[in-house]
């Protein structure tokens, strides 16, 4: 089958979920009114008593029948709110959510379970909450019990279950409920190792079923790459990457990498960020090409600076392999590299290109320093450097590359001499 025919086949699949221009906001209280009098006083003073939190903005995507669709993003990005909109728990402020089929939503495992009821009774209770009839629950009950491996305990009260047993039962109900669309929120790492293997086998099987659709929210990028065929990445309430699951997972890894470094940055409350001053108020590395590089095409980046002193100065560059905690390149103290000398004073940029063919897959960041020389032959003085917020972050992803070392086997050749 040709690629064009495959694309046509995909396009002809039924759309089971369509999210169009969806937005959702919440009111967060800022002033507490203990009574009607205080509320009137606040109103006369122009105090609204709340501020708007815009959780989702103009979200658009669709899910086809048979998709294993991943939704990823950092905590607070809007993922759980989106799932609640899809599940009908919330209504969107703008836009629409269209579901075509029976949707079974498990946003939190065990929600709706009653500790005073038996395991059997809780299965029927949860099934009823999901909209299944008594007869439909009868039909799926044995599958649920078999998967949970709790047949000996189904007539005991749930409060006598261990936490692991409760999770297994809840998860079994989640994945064995016979719906068309299964919505799961961070529920892959449940139970012991043997039970996790069973869950892994189940998802591998359901991925092959063209009639089953799964929407999965997870922080596990291994799960996204293994199970999903499509994914979206949400950041600050907006979709910033969508489509290929590997691309989305790699971008999420890069976002996490950059966010972690930014949270570690030292902020002393001064006027300028760490590493900068009145002498050099701007020094920043901007990635110009894709931040997820293919390891074949060179990486293009620029260094933005603001320097006005008359002293000769030059840019130093260091490349850090974050995964392996080693410097792949460091030209920070070289004064003989004339290509790094600053020729224009004021606010300007210098553009660079770096080949990536010698590197294995990994996550990298580019640091920059600005060093001034008072007199020829003297040691340079570092007067500015990029903190973690102003570094350039990128990842390399290529199937032909290895993962173990920094340098690819193509970069080093060892010849036998005897």
Image: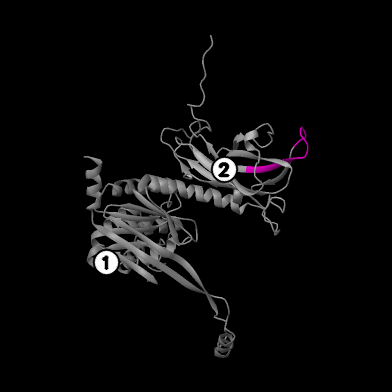
Magenta residues, as a range? 368-379
Query: From this viewpoint, is residue 196 visible?
Result: no
* Relative to 208, 417 lies left or right: right
Taking 315 as reference, is 295 left or right?
Answer: left
Dot label at residue 132: 1
Residue found 46% across the figure and 36% down from its top: 295
Question: Which residue lies at the image location 74% right of the left edge and 42% below the top edge?
Answer: 311
Q: Which mark is residue 365?
A: 2
Q: CA distance from mark 2 to mark 1?
A: 52 Å
Rendered image: mark on residue 272: none
Colour pattern of the rendering: one colour
Tell me the quarter of the picture where residue 22 sits: bottom left
Please tell me how crowded label 2 is: few (under 14), some (14-19), or many (20+) other residues with Cα within 10 Å.
some
Q: What is the x, y in percent for residue 21?
A: 37, 65
Query: Picture quarter containing residue 88?
Result: bottom left
Residue 371 highlighted magenta (yes or no):
yes
The x and y percentages for residue 374 are 77, 40
Query: Closer to the observer: label 2 or label 1?
Result: 2
Decide which of tag 2 and tag 1 comes sooner along the chain. Answer: 1
Q: Quadrant of the N terminus?
A: top left
Residue situated in front as seen by the camera: 198 or 235: 235
Tell me the crowding category of disc 1: few under 14, some 14 to 19, or many 20 or more residues within 10 angstroms, Cα based: some
Residue drawn at x 55%, y 80% is 49
């Amino acid at each position: 089958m040709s690629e064009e025919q495959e694309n046509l086949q995909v396009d002809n699949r039924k759309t089971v979920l369509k999210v169009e221009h969806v937005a959702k906001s919440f009111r967060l209280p800022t002033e507490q009114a203990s009574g009607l009098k205080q509320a009137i006083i606040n109103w006369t003073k122009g105090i609204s008593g709340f501020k708007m939190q815009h959780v989702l903005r103009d979200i658009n995507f669709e899910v086809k029948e048979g998709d294993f669709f991943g939704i990823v993003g950092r905590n607070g990005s809007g993922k759980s709110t989106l799932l609640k909109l899809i599940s009908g728990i919330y209504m969107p402020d703008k836009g629409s959510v269209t579901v075509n089929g029976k949707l079974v939503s498990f946003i939190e495992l065990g929600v709706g379970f009653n500790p005073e009821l038996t395991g059997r009774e809780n299965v029927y209770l949860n099934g009823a909450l999901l909209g299944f009839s008594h007869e439909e629950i009868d039909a799926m009950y044995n599958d649920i019990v078999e998967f949970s491996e709790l047949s000996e305990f189904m007539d005991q009260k749930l409060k006598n279950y261990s936490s692991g047993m409760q999770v297994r039962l809840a998860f079994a109900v989640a994945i064995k409920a016979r719906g068309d669309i299964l919505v799961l929120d961070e529920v892959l790492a449940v139970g012991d190792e043997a039970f996790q293997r069973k869950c892994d086998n189940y998802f591998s099987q359901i991925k092959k079923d063209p009639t089953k659709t799964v929407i999965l929210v997870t922080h596990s990028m291994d799960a996204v790459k293994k199970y999903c065929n499509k994914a979206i990445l949400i950041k600050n309430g907006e979709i910033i990457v969508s489509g290929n699951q590997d691309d989305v997972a790699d971008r999420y890894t890069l976002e996490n990498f950059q966010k972690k470094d930014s949270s570690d940055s030292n902020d002393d409350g001064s006027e300028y960020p760490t590493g900068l001053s009145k002498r050099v108020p701007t020094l920043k590395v901007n990635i110009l090409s894709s931040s997820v590089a293919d390891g074949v095409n060179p990486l293009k980046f620029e260094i933005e600076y603001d320097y006005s002193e008359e002293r000769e100065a030059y840019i130093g560059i260091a490349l850090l392999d974050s995964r392996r905690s080693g410097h792949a390149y460091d030209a920070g103290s070289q004064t003989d590299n004339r290509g790094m000398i600053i020729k224009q004073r004021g606010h300007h940029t210098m553009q660079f290109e770096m080949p990536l063919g010698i590197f294995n897959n990994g996550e990298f960041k580019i640091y920059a320093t600005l060093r001034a020389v008072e007199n020829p032959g003297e040691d340079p003085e570092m007067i500015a450097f990029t903190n973690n917020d102003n570094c350039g972050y990128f990842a390399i992803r290529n199937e032909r590359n290895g993962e173990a070392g920094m340098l690819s086997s193509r970069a080093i050749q060892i010849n036998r001499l005897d």
